[in-house]
Image (spheres, coloured by chain):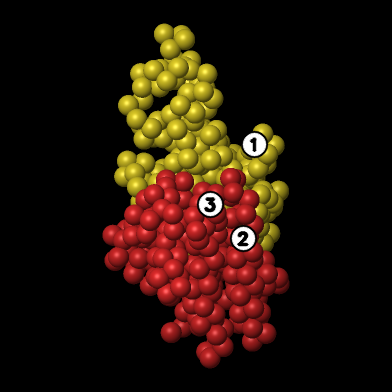
Chain colours: A red, B yellow
Amino acid sequence: MGRTSDARERILTAARTLMLSRGYSALGVAEICAAAGVPKGSFYYFFASKEELALAVVEEHWAGQRAEWTRALAGDVPPLRRLRRLYESTEAELRAGRESCGTVTGCLLGNLALELSTRTESVRERLREIFDEQVALVAETVAEARARGEVTVADTGAAARALVAQLEGRVLFAKLYDDPGRLDALWADSLALLGAEESQGAV
Amino acid sequence: MGRTSDARERILTAARTLMLSRGYSALGVAEICAAAGVPKGSFYYFFASKEELALAVVEEHWAGQRAEWTRALAGDVPPLRRLRRLYESTEAELRAGRESCGTVTGCLLGNLALELSTRTESVRERLREIFDEQVALVAETVAEARARGEVTVADTGAAARALVAQLEGRVLFAKLYDDPGRLDALWADSLALLGAEESQGAV
């Protein structure tokens, strides 16, 4: 069982790395198995199809990212400071990814949203739920900031959707221009989208 | 020559439609030729590789889109009204695409930016130039609005990058949720990002 679970984990890790750098369609099962160092038979022992693997990769990726988002947005400092911490952590992740892959690979969930939405309903469905969850996490923080009179938005859900869209748009350009610094402006963008003062959420 | 140029055009049209709905990696040359109704030999008469085809598709797509952006941003009405017209035209295009393809296929350039940036340097390079051009077109309009005292941004280039990122982010979610209405909020987002009054750019 020890070796078996290890093989599943190695397939997931290899698939995640390959999907980040090359996308989903360009990958074959044989290549994933070679990168993971497991025989092809093992793959089909754990996953019925490449689609099922993609769902598992998304699940594992979001589990890690959700933990990071929850940590960043946890209530030990004022709400806007926490939002800023989320952006800092996202930019740090892009920088770390660039160190290890040699290029900004972007947001796995955003990449797959554009690559697979029109083709794989199960992945699209799961990505919708995940982005809904991201919006809910941000909306909660925005609601706290509004209760403190720090932001002026009328609809915290709508404001959170604007912030998450801005984040994904900025990450797209960070990837295209291979420059994590494209996220530097995210904080100013967000203050503007929230109708907040420049002085809010200062470090 | 008449028939020959027609074949090239048919390959480009088929490739553009297929790339919008399924991405680049999932496509094969044989499939493109079948959709275009041309023999495979014709393909290699016009294009040395699938990469070269992708560049030609990007070129043709941007030529059409640039004409649309230039028309929308042309100076017959106040600048913010023109910016709004650009969003309306983008949303109308997503709606029309949904009518013909059955689903929102999003922005071909944004799709390819995420799918190919880390893999195909020639496409990445061209997409960078195109998005730089989009930012420049928007920045010009923002500068006009600033000269009229309608927006308060300090750096029009930075403001334009924020607007184009917001546009790409919103289009990503329009595709994921198969809902062109996700662009409805773009106008309010943009007024906030520009530090403009809600009353600006009204229809």
- Circles 1, 3 touching at the beta carbon (< 8 Å): no
Q: Secondary structure at mark 1?
A: helix
Question: Looking at the picture, does residue B167 appear above or below residue A185?
Answer: above
Residue B1's x, y, as percent? 41, 8
Of residue A50 and residue A67, the one placed in the foreground of this image is A50
Q: Amino acid at mark 2?
A: Arg
Q: Amino acid at mark 3?
A: Ser
Q: Point out which mark residue A126 bears.
A: 2
Q: Is residue A132 visible?
A: yes
| Point 34% across, 57% down: residue | A35
- Within 10 Å of disc 1 (Cα), the crowding (few <14, some 14-19, many 20+) is some
**Callout in the foreground (1, 3):** 3
Of residue A30 and residue A182, the one placed in the foreground of this image is A30
Q: Is residue A179 visible?
A: no
Residue B181's x, y, as percent? 69, 51
Using residue B175 as the reference point, say whether residue B110 is left or right of it. left
Q: Point out which mark residue A49 bears.
A: 3
Chain assignment, label 1: B
What residue does disc 1 label? Answer: B101
| Point 68% across, 69% down: residue | A157
